[in-house]
Amino acid sequence: MRLILFGGPGSGKGTQAAILTTLLGIPHISTGDILRAERAAGTPLGQQAQSYMDRGELVPDQVIVEMVANRLQQPDTASGWLLDGFPRNGAQAAVFEEMLKSIHQDYDYLLFLDVPAAILQERALNRAKQAANGQQRSDDTPETILKRVQVYERETLPMIQQYMSHPKFVHIDGTRTIEEVTAAIQARIGEVNRV
């Protein structure tokens, strides 16, 4: 099973990714983890990414996509993978689709955890309060979280809207409980129940 999971910051994406990867026995792959691993290993791509970051620039889409391609071809992905929050925009999506063809892979489902912006912002502010109390990541300030929501709305949401007509697109109401969201995903992708 190869899955791509989309959703805004605070949509429950990380929670559902953890549940699904456990149920399916597949690795959870996020670009942040890949980037950290490539940099730590000192790979050519990791060094290239580091040079952009040292200059305070975004790592170009092509470099990120090459890192994702390398990760999707590791031995632990033979039985499938769950790609979390990538691609993030239309430009990445186009390069990503070409990359998948070049490594002879495809995805089974595009899962979209749909949560309205107002709820994302409310959840984001709750996370910021928890961060202030030392219960969450230290970079979860109201400003950074709201900025993440704005970037998601500006860059990622338009790309997701383009994917909505794709036959593999699965729309999930992300406002429900964790258990209800998991059950809705299971009902749509079926094979989760075999594990």
Image (cartoon, grey):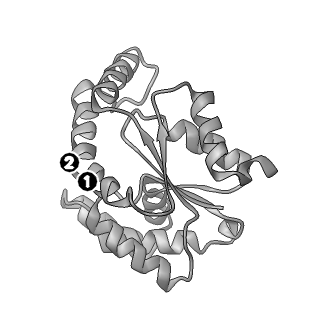
Question: Between marks 2 and 1, how big is the CA–CA gap?
Answer: 7 Å
Toward the viewer: 65 or 112?
112
Closer to the eye: label 2 or 1 = 1
User: Do the CB atoms of the residues marked 2 and 1 lie less than 8 Å apart?
Assistant: yes
* Residue 177 horizontal side relative to residue 156, left or right: right
Rendered location of residue 140, percent (x, y): 34, 29
Q: In which quarter of the image is the N terminus?
A: bottom right
Per the image, the residue denoted by label 1 is: 158
**Callout 1: SS:** helix
Q: What's the residue type where badge 2 is placed?
A: Arg
Q: On screen, 46 above or below 140? A: below
Q: Which residue lies furthest to the right in this view?
A: 194
Toward the viewer: 18 or 115?
115
Question: Is residue 195 among what the camera can see?
Answer: no
Rendered location of residue 157, percent (x, y): 29, 49
Q: What's the residue type where badge 1 is placed?
A: Pro
Q: On screen, 54 above or below 71? A: above
- Give the image quarter of residue 22: top right
* Residue 75 horizontal side relative to residue 181, left or right: right
Residue in view at x 25 percent, y 34 percent: 144
Q: How many labels were placed on the picture?
A: 2
Question: Is residue 137 among what the camera can see?
Answer: yes
Rendered location of residue 7, percent (x, y): 41, 43
Residue in view at x 55 percent, y 73 percent: 106
Q: How crowded is mark 2: few (under 14 residues within 10 Å), some or many (20 or more)?
A: few
Residue in view at x 28 percent, y 32 percent: 117
* Residue 117 horizontal side relative to residue 11, left or right: left
Q: On screen, 86 above or below 141? A: below
Q: How crowded is mark 1: few (under 14 residues within 10 Å), some or many (20 or more)?
A: some
Q: Residue 154 carries which label?
A: 2
Residue in view at x 27 percent, y 40 percent: 148
Rendered location of residue 49, percent (x, y): 33, 67
